[in-house]
Each structure stands twice: as structure tokens, then as C-alpha cells.
Amino acid sequence: MRNPIGPFMVTTLLLITFLLLTNYAYGKSKSEWLSDNPCMIKVVITEKCLDSECLISETTKEEVLKCSDGYDGPSYWELFAQFYYTDLTTEPYCRHFARPDHPFKTPGTVCLSENGVWREE
């Protein structure tokens, strides 16, 4: 007796493979705008001397969102409104960025946490 589920499974596998290959082939058009306007998190390390011979120094590390479209992150009032008026149904402050090295060329997401740290999701 022949298994009736076998042909269904083979057809489903072929359909999934076709969809994955199509998504990979046409992935560039999905994030075309993001490729033209990519954003990145730039780590800025600053060292400040506290004495004349620079034996004692203070080093600070800051993560800054830099975008080629000129958008350098949310303003003070955007952050204020985001966290002051937030509740359980409000989504966190997030922004998409291009991932040209990703197998499916899908955009990534970077979100701002409540303590002001950008993290990739």
C-alpha cells in the first residue's frame, strides 16, 4: 500500500525550496532603500588626561548611531516622549538597517533600551 502523505511532503519541500531561492535571488530589491541609507552603531572612545603628565586619565566609551542619510538618532524630545508616555502596548524605539551580507538580504533592527543603549535584535 502506498503512503498518501509522501507526495504531499515532497511537493511541500519543493515549494519551500523554490520560495527560499526566489527570496534569495530577489533579495536586493527588498532592501534597496536601506542599502542606499545604511545606519551603523559607531563606538567612540575618548581619553581625557586629568593631570599634566597624563598619568591619570579618564576613558569614556559611547555608542552613537550614524546614518548616511543624515539621521543621527532620536532627538531629546523623541526619547522623552518614547519613555515618558510608554506603556505595555508601546513598542520600543527601533530603526532598521541594511544587512548586505545576510543570506536573505533582510534588514536588521537596532533598538534603544530604556538606559540609552542601542542593541541589535
Image (cartoon, helix red, strand yellow):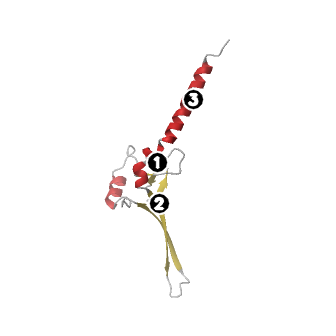
Q: CA distance from mark 1 to mark 3?
A: 26 Å
Give the residue number, with chain letter if any, for mark 2: 41
Q: Earlier in the sequence, mark 3 or mark 2?
A: 3
Residue 99 % position (x, y): 49, 51
Q: Earlier in the sequence, mark 1 or mark 3?
A: 3
Give the amino acid type for the residue marked by disc 2 in the picture: Ile
Give the residue number, with chain letter if any, for mark 3: 14
Q: Are marks 1 and 3 in contact (CB under 8 Å)?
A: no
Q: Nearer the viewer, mark 3 or mark 2?
A: 3
Q: Nearer the viewer, residue 43 or 60?
A: 43
Give the amino acid type for the residue marked by disc 3 in the picture: Leu
Secondary-structure class at tag 1: loop
Residue 27 % position (x, y): 47, 43
Give the residue number, with chain letter if any, for mark 1: 107
Q: CA distance from mark 1 to mark 2?
A: 15 Å
Residue that appears at 54% across and 46% down: 103
Residue that appears at 53% across and 48% down: 102
Give the amino acid type for the residue marked by disc 1 in the picture: Pro
Name above or below for residue 55 compared with residue 43: below
Name above or below for residue 47 compared with residue 11: below
The reply to whether residue 92 is in sight is no
Secondary-structure class at tag 3: helix
The reply to whether residue 64 is in sight is yes
Q: CA distance from mark 3 to mark 2?
A: 39 Å
Residue 94 % position (x, y): 41, 51
